[in-house]
Amino acid sequence: MTGAEEKLHGLNRIVDHLVPGRSTAVRPPNRKELAKTSVLALSLTEASVKTRSGPANDEEEDLNLPYWTGVIPLHSVAGEPENNPDCDLLVPAHVRSRANRLGAPS
């Protein structure tokens, strides 16, 4: 594979990860677009993440301190797919399917 072929392969993998089948339903990037885009591949042997749910777990001695404790819940919900103003095509099934899986109304 050439550098450009590897870059295009990586971009297609990213696009298809977000919306399966999308890379085959759009035009490929032109040389100028491809040249302006960077793709970084990392080989991971380890990864870690720290997650939790529920309220903060304050230490007993911290409970009377004058500091707010709590959480800000975050929710991601997709909306109905919207065409660009210059596009009068129907939303492709693979795009609508992905949006629905992300919470868009059917």
Image (cartoon, rainbow, N blue to C red):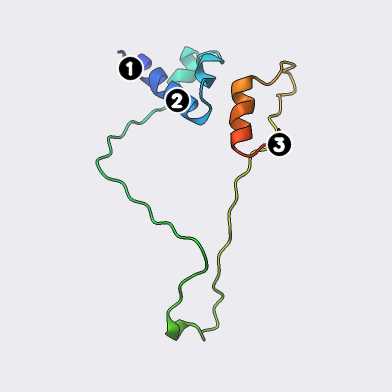
Against 77, is 89 above or below?
A: above
User: Depth check: 35 or 79 in front?
Assistant: 79
Residue 26 in the image: x percent, y percent? 56, 15
**Residue found 48% across the figure and 16% down from its top:** 32
Query: Disc 3 marks which amino acid?
Result: Pro
Query: Answer yes or no: do the residues labelled 1 and 3 have beta carbons within 8 Å?
Result: no
Report the disc number at residue 45.
none
Against 65, is 20 above or below?
A: above
- Disc 2 marks which residue? 37
- Disc 3 marks which residue? 105
Instruction: Quadrant for residue 2, please give it.
Output: top left
Instruction: Quadrant for residue 91, please give it.
Output: top right
**Which of marks 3 and 1 precedes in the sequence?**
1
**Which of marks 1 and 2 precedes in the sequence?**
1
- Element under disc 1: helix
* Nearest to viewer (mark 1 / mark 3): 3
